[in-house]
């Protein structure tokens, strides 16, 4: 009765599905106010000279000029690039190899998978502090190799400005490759068994099958994984804070830390906004083409 | 017959490690100690050991006394097991002026995680349900913004949120942080629930509509009971995510209400006093314990959760 009543009368558009709209208010507010509004707000204020409090006194590109003249910002960018490129390569390669090994119909697969993935359950803070201890020059790896007789062994990444970012990379890879392995494994499992049979019948060696048949077939998985890794890399923050606090001598600074420090410690909001806008820009360069390929095509097709 | 043979080979086990782990599965038996298997299991075991070493080192260090740590080697097992570092980490370790240990951070984290998990999942599941079954005009636009927003670096949005929370009088409070976690958990959770509810047969929903059930009634009576598995996945995802959060904790809470991760970092990286590595490691394990337990208990569901969240996100 009531249903037919509402459908014939068709009240104002606004009140159709009213409950659904009310229930979606948190989503609408988050999307419009926080994600769109917040981002726009930060971009606008990155052109002002806000210090302790945000204020609308526009100074053009001053903040950006100052940002790009800071050696600390350059170090941050450089670190992020090194960390990003290497962690991208290593986590893809290691993750894929581990997944391929686990995909050989082995015994105790779930045990191995559990072991490879458990670091991912740990926070970056825990990861960073653990590796800070393992890489501790006086007690950790360096000390042990030296006490085994190799006196000149030098591996002290956390106190060496040149290689500190690699120390962080080791910890980051330990924490994150399990996830990549899981994604890759899911991708490998999605490949038709018949492909393997056909390759075997044709006498193609296993490594060739992987390289020329399976990996090209897993392209969507690789692209998605790439985007996940990339958007995670830009957020690199907790790990650095826990493991090195940006040291030694600022050698392991990263952009996210730059933003936090300028916004909440140095009380130079404008710099923080400019730096975070640069972060947004770099993510956009990666994500927009991907989203276009992934979703733009689908809608039209 | 062939199976018995394999079993025998395994039992005899020339190389105990490889013998124990290798062996064919299914109908077609292969040689147990083939070169392929040695390589395969050898590699996997080496990598597994590498992944386990940090956990081992943490545990071992936390059970040693400081004199033993200064003399020895981080990999050697403790000569004299002591639980004192654990007690100290939990009850008396200092951050700044507070000397009541990590227990404070633990309870703060519990107080933050529980309402955040409930609130964020409640909101996102209703969102997902509305998106899947009650498509209204513009819904897809909001959803697209939400998903794209998941890729925006948090740093771009943290300050506007500070202002919003301050305007609402929630900045620095527990509920402020709950809202922040709900906001940033929303993209992935909404996606998770939307996809799940979309897979529910449309007829079920229509039948309920014909019977006169409304938005909330269909949600609570039909959808909610059916979606229990996905709720479990969401809960796992959120507990680990929120417990492990550091950035939001440091920004949106005050020292008294710092979550465990922030307090842990302050304890370990404090520059004052003598470094007590055993206490630090005990504190680190304590902080990692909750997500680890969730991980080991939930097993496959955890994997499904991150796969669902990651592959589609």
Image: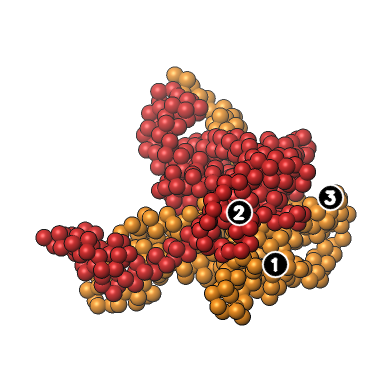
Q: Nearer the viewer, mark 3 or mark 1?
A: 1
Residue A120 position (above or below residue B301): below
Q: Nearer the viewer, mark 1 or mark 2?
A: 2
Q: Position of residue A133 (x, y in %)?
A: 61, 61
Both marks 1 and 2 on one chain: no
Q: Position of residue A77 (x, y in %)?
A: 70, 69
Q: Secondary structure at mark 2?
A: loop
Q: Nearer the viewer, mark 3 or mark 2?
A: 2
The mark tally for this picture is: 3
Q: Is residue B22 left or right of residue A131?
A: left
Q: Secondary structure at mark 3?
A: loop
Q: Chain of mark 3?
A: A
Chain A colour as displayed: orange
Chain letter tied to red: B
Both marks 3 and 1 on one chain: yes
Q: Which residue is mark 3?
A: A54
In the rendered image, which quarter is residue A233 located in? bottom right
Residue at 56% in and 49% down: B82
In 3D space, how far apart are the residues under numbered discs 3 and 1 (Cα atoms)?
29 Å
Residue A252: image tag: 1
Circle nearer the N terminus (3, 1): 3
Q: Chain of mark 1?
A: A
Q: Are marks 3 and 1 in contact (CB under 8 Å)?
A: no
In 3D space, how far apart are the residues under numbered discs 3 and 2 (Cα atoms)?
50 Å
Q: Are marks 3 and 2 in contact (CB under 8 Å)?
A: no
Residue at 84% in and 54% down: A267
**Front position in the image: B161 or B140:** B161
Q: Are marks 1 and 2 in contact (CB under 8 Å)?
A: no
């Amino acid at each position: 009765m009531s249903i037919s009543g509402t459908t014939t009368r068709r009240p104002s558009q606004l009140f159709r599905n009213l409950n659904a709209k009310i229930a979606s208010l948190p989503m609408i507010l988050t999307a419009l106010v926080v994600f769109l509004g917040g981002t726009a707000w930060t971009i606008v204020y990155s052109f002002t000279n806000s210090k302790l409090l945000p204020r609308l006194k526009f100074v053009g590109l001053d903040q950006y000029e100052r940002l790009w003249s800071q050696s600390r910002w350059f170090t941050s960018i450089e670190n992020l690039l090194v960390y990003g490129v290497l962690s991208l390569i290593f986590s893809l390669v290691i993750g894929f190899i581990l997944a391929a090994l686990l995909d050989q119909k082995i015994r105790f697969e779930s045990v191995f998978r559990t072991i490879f993935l458990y670091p991912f359950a740990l926070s970056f803070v825990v990861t960073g502090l653990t590796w800070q201890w393992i890489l501790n020059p006086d007690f950790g790896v360096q000390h042990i190799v030296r006490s085994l007789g190799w006196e000149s062994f030098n591996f002290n990444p956390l106190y060496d400005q040149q290689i500190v970012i690699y120390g962080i990379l080791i910890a980051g890879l330990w924490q994150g490759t399990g996830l990549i392995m899981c994604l890759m494994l899911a991708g490998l499992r999605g490949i038709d068994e018949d492909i393997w049979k056909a390759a075997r019948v044709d006498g193609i060696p296993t490594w060739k099958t992987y390289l020329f048949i399976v990996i090209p077939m897993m392209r969507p998985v690789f692209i998605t994984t790439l985007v996940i890794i990339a958007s995670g890399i830009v957020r690199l923050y907790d790990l650095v804070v826990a493991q090195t606090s940006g040291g030694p001598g600022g050698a392991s600074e990263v952009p996210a830390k730059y933003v936090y420090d300028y916004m909440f410690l140095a009380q130079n909001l404008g710099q923080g906004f400019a730096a975070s806008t640069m972060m947004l820009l770099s993510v956009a360069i990666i994500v927009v083409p991907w989203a276009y390929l992934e979703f733009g095509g689908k809608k039209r097709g | 017959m062939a199976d018995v043979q394999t079993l025998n080979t395994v039992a005899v086990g020339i190389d105990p490690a490889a013998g124990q782990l290798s062996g064919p599965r299914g109908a077609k038996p292969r040689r147990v100690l083939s070169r392929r298997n040695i390589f395969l299991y050898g590699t996997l075991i080496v990598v597994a050991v590498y992944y386990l070493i940090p956990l081992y080192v943490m545990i071992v260090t936390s059970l040693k006394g400081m004199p033993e740590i200064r003399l020895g080697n981080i990999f050697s097992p403790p000569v004299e097991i002591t639980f004192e570092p654990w007690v100290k980490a939990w009850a008396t370790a200092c951050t700044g002026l507070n000397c009541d240990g990590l227990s404070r951070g633990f309870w703060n984290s519990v107080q933050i995680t529980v309402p955040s998990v409930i609130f964020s999942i409640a909101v996102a599941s209703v969102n997902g349900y509305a998106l899947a079954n009650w498509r209204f005009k513009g819904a897809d636009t909001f959803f697209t913004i939400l998903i794209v927003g998941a890729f925006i670096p948090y740093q771009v949005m943290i300050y506007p949120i500070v202002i919003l929370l301050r305007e609402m009088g929630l900045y620095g409070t527990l509920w402020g942080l709950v809202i922040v976690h709900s906001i940033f958990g929303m993209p992935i959770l909404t996606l998770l629930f939307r996809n799940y509810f979309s897979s529910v047969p449309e007829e079920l929903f229509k039948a309920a509509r014909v019977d006169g059930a409304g938005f909330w009634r269909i949600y609570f009576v039909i959808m909610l009971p059916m979606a229990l598995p996905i709720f479990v996945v969401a809960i796992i995802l959120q507990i680990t995510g929120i417990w492990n959060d550091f950035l939001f904790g440091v920004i949106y809470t005050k020292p008294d209400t710092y979550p465990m991760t922030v307090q842990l970092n302050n304890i370990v990286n404090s520059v004052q006093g003598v470094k007590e590595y055993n206490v630090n490691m005990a504190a680190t394990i304590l902080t990692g314990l909750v997500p680890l337990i969730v991980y080991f208990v939930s097993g496959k569901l955890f994997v499904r959760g991150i796969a669902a969240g990651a592959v589609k996100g």
